[in-house]
């Protein structure tokens, strides 16, 4: 049995309410000592928190009791909703601690939910993803994981593997009574598992991008319209726009949502030749580093003048970046009309994306093209998201499945084949947490905040 733990579950700043959460077998005993009325289980209780040593009234609160196992952690839980004053919230927490609870570690509530089999490890990790989600898309995928979509996917594979292992083991243990499993039957389970894992891993890159976000740099000569595009993508005025070359001396960055992908958009200082002062020179150096670190670079030139040798020189200076799109600005002056739904535009200077930050011409289309370049179209099919740890386990499982497949095709002894199949099962079990060591658990839950 675990200790009874408590923590503040809301941010410690002035707000309308603050929540103190207690979990463990002493939860009801503790609240009964500090609440001015008997607690009615499964009811919303309204009353006062009283210091049981001094008799001092601390705050008028609402207490939500949850009896085990019908609670988040699977233990008795008390949630005290107080007024959102950091002083009051701390005072109540201290009172709870004085009456027998221990301060929770990071993520300890969720860890208990996992250890008490309320959720599997993929769902516990989803709680963290949900809290940290930067876009609605990542939040909705994390919510799917929390409701068990990844867990179900993994379990569907584990179930088939366990069934075939049971058959192989039975035939090995009782060769007189149970006949050997057909190799074709084993192969069909291995094929099913391999295909499923490969499909998930195909999207791993997209999952990582969705979780971690991308960096987009806007580059080009001074006055081509970088700051204006930055503002247009942001939909509000952030960068100072002037027609004096070199106005943006340093890089400015903001977070934006590119169709569900969290992106850091960077407006770089104008890179240009000629006489520039020292401050501007530092800005130019910073721009080059930023551009090198970016996932995609938007290469801008002024549509009124067309791409000139100085523009091309700038684009050549930033050719270390993996992906780039060419963008012709100020369409409202040239009035060029381009097909909006062509995903190949922007790949070359001859076929640029044409935009106007003034009229917003082509801006939504640009977002779609960036999304397509970075993520591709696949992500629409997926209804869950994986993290690096889960991907590593999937890769390990896949390599064991492949070894088992090879052995099966060569009709090797089935007890040898079963060793690889068992190893694949163990790797899959690491995702759901069936097989997991304390070190991995500590690493996962250390990333949480206290009170979750
Ligand atoms: P930067 O130096 O590359 O960041 O360029 P700015 O965004 O500061 O723009 C330079 C000048 O071009 C400013 O006077 C802007 O108002 C103008 N400009 C930028 N984008 C457009 C556009 O789409 N249409 C028009 N007509 N002017 C633009």
Image (cartoon, rainbow, N blue to C red):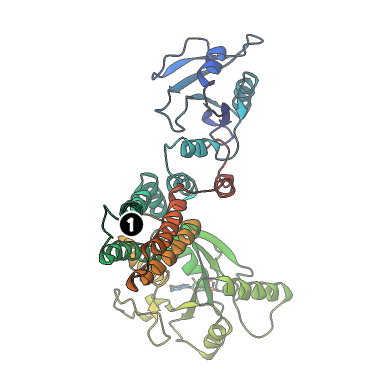
Up/down of 440 relative to 200, above or below? above
Residue 98 in view here:
yes
Secondary structure of residue under mark 1: helix
Front-most of residues 337 and 67? 67
Residue situated furthest right in the rendering: 278
Residue 212 x, y percent position in the rendering: 50, 59
Residue situated furthest front in the rendering: 176
Q: Is residue 285 left or right of residue 158?
A: right
Up/down of 151 relative to 94, above or below? below
Front-most of residues 313 and 59? 59
Residue 256 x, y percent position in the rendering: 47, 59
Q: Which of the 4 quarters of the picture holds residue 93? A: top right
- The residue at 36%/46% (across/down) is 148
Up/down of 37 relative to 401, above or below? above
Q: Is residue 436 left or right of residue 273?
A: left
Residue situated furthest bottom in the rendering: 309
- The residue at 55%/48% (across/down) is 437
Residue 315 x, y percent position in the rendering: 53, 83
The quarter of the rendered structure image containing the N terminus is top right
Residue 238 in view here:
no
Residue 382 x, y percent position in the rendering: 33, 59
- The residue at 46%/86% (across/down) is 305
- The residue at 39%/69% (across/down) is 402
Q: How many marks?
A: 1
Q: Is mark 1 within 8 Å of ligand 1?
A: no
Front-most of residues 345 and 393? 393
Identify the residue under disc 1: 168
Q: Bin the neighbour count of mark 1 within 10 Å (Cα to Cα): few under 14, some 14-19, many 20 and up.
A: many
Up/down of 299 relative to 368, above or below? below
């Amino acid at each position: 049995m675990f200790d009874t733990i408590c923590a503040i579950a809301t941010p410690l700043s002035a707000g309308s309410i603050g929540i103190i959460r207690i979990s463990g077998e002493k939860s009801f005993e503790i609240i009964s000592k500090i609440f001015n009325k008997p607690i009615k289980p499964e009811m919303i209780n309204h009353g006062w928190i009283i210091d049981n040593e001094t008799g001092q009234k601390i705050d008028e609160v609402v207490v939500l009791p949850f009896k085990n196992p019908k609670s988040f952690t699977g233990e008795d839980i008390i949630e005290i909703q107080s007024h959102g004053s950091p002083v009051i919230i701390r005072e109540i927490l201290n009172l709870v601690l004085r009456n027998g609870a221990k301060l929770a570690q990071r993520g300890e509530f969720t860890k208990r939910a996992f250890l008490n089999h309320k959720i599997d490890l993929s769902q516990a990790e989803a709680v963290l993803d949900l809290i940290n989600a930067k876009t609605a898309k990542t939040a909705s995928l994390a919510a799917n994981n929390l409701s068990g979509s990844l867990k179900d996917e993994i379990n569907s594979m584990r179930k088939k593997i366990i069934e075939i292992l049971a058959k192989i083991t039975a035939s090995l243990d009782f060769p007189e009574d149970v006949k050997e499993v057909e190799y074709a039957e084993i192969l069909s389970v291995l094929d099913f598992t391999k295909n499923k894992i490969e499909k998930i891993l195909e999207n791993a890159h997209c999952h990582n991008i969705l979780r971690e976000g991308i960096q987009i740099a806007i580059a080009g000569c001074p006055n081509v319209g970088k700051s204006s595009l930055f503002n247009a993508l942001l939909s509000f005025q952030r960068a100072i726009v002037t027609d004096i070359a070199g106005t943006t001396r340093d890089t400015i960055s903001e977070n934006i949502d590119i169709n569900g992908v969290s992106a850091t958009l960077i407006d770089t200082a104008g890179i240009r030749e000629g006489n520039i002062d020292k401050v501007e020179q530092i800005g130019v150096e910073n721009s080059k580093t930023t551009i090198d670190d970016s996932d995609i670079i938007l290469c801008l030139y002024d549509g009124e003048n067309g791409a000139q040798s100085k523009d091309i020189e700038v684009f050549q200076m930033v050719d270390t970046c993996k992906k780039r799109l060419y963008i012709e600005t100020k369409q409202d002056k040239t009035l060029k009309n381009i097909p909006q739904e062509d995903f190949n535009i922007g790949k070359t200077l001859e076929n640029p994306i044409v935009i106007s930050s003034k009229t917003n011409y082509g801006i939504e289309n640009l977002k779609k093209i960036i999304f397509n370049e970075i993520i591709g179209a696949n992500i629409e099919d997926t209804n869950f998201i994986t993290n690096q740890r889960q991907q590593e386990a999937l890769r390990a499982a896949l390599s064991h499945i492949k070894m088992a497949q090879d052995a099966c095709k060569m009709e090797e002894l089935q007890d040898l084949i079963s060793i690889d199949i068992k190893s694949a099962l163990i790797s899959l079990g690491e995702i759901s947490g069936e097989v997991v060591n304390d070190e991995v658990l500590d690493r996962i839950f250390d990333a949480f905040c206290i009170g979750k």
